[in-house]
Amino acid sequence: MTRETPVDCGPLTVKFFIDPDEASTLDTEVFDDDRSLNDYKLSIKYSEIVGKKGIYNINYIAYYTAYEDNNIILPGPFVITVIDPCENDASLDRVNLAN
């Protein structure tokens, strides 16, 4: 995301949400929304909670903090799929045993 104005309109606010519900928040057991350095770093956490597998349609809204009504929203979500790698037999290797 880049600023398209030579004027400093103040800090940006970015909110991630589960599309299409702008009021929703991301599951903190699955996603890490790190704002520690005033960056927007969305990452997926390691988890062994099988119930968290699924398809997550994520979107965001961004705006200058003082101008919330002047915002942009992605035209469509980006998709993150969380899988259970043990469900597929590809995680097992067949070994032929000798006598």
Image (tube, rainbow, N blue to C red):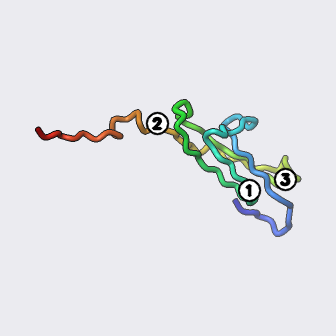
Query: Circle 1 sits on which residue?
Result: 36
Q: CA distance from mark 1 to mark 3?
A: 17 Å
Taking the image as shown, residue 29 lies to the left or right of residue 3, namely: left
Q: Please say if 28 is above or below 6.
A: above
User: Residue 16: image x %, image y %?
Assistant: 70, 45
Q: Is residue 41 left or right of residue 64?
A: left
Instruction: Assign a secondary structure to mark 1.
Output: loop
Q: CA distance from mark 3 to mark 2?
A: 38 Å
Residue type, mark 1 in image: Ser
Badge 2 element: loop
The label on residue 84 is 2
Q: Residue at x 63, y 44 (%)?
A: 31
Crowding at dot 3, Cα within 10 Å, few <14 / some 14-19 / many 20+, comes out as some
User: Can you give x and y, in whole percent of width and height, for residue 91 in the image?
Assistant: 35, 40
Residue kind at label 3, given as amino acid type: Thr
Location of mark 3 (residue) = 65
Q: Position of residue 49 (x, y in %)?
A: 54, 34
Which residue reaches farthest front?
Answer: 99
Residue at x 79%, y 56% (from the top left corner)? 12
Give the mark nearest the N terminus, 1 or 2.
Answer: 1
Residue 54: tell me if it is visible.
Answer: no
